[in-house]
Amino acid sequence: GALAFPVSGEVEANANLSLIAVEAQGYTFDHWERNGESIGTNKILSTTVTPLAEGEASAVYTAVFTEG
């Protein structure tokens, strides 16, 4: 499914997930990160949610924007 951003909650492992980066005035979308690692540059991130790795408490997806 698709989620509005920002959001928190649980998603089942192996579920398909789509996130859409929406730019505010004065900002340009740059890339997506999962737990601080770059995972894509498309405004729409379509991914399969993988189970958490050992030691991971959560998976945080972040849309990164640049000003200008």
Image: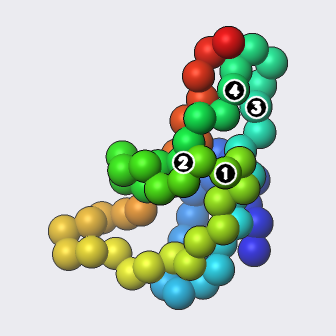
Of the numbered discs 1 and 2, the one sitting upstream in the chain is 2
Q: Secondary structure at mark 2?
A: strand
Q: CA distance from mark 2 to mark 4?
A: 12 Å
Residue depicted at x 68% and y 12%? 68
Q: Mark 3 belongs to which amino acid?
A: Glu
Q: Secondary structure at mark 3?
A: loop
Instruction: State the residue position of label 2.
Output: 32
Q: Using the image, tell me which numbered label, if any, was put on residue 28.
A: 4
Q: Is residue 36 above or below residue 51?
A: above
Q: Using the image, tell me which numbered label, if any, was put on residue 23.
A: 3
Residue depicted at x 56% and y 42%? 31
Mark 4 and mark 3 residues within 8 Å of each other at the beta carbon? yes
Instruction: State the residue position of label 1.
Output: 42
Q: CA distance from mark 3 to mark 2?
A: 13 Å
Can the viewer see residue 45 in this picture?
yes
Q: Quadrant of residue 59?
A: bottom left
Q: Nearer the viewer, mark 1 or mark 2?
A: 1
Q: Quadrant of the N terminus?
A: bottom right
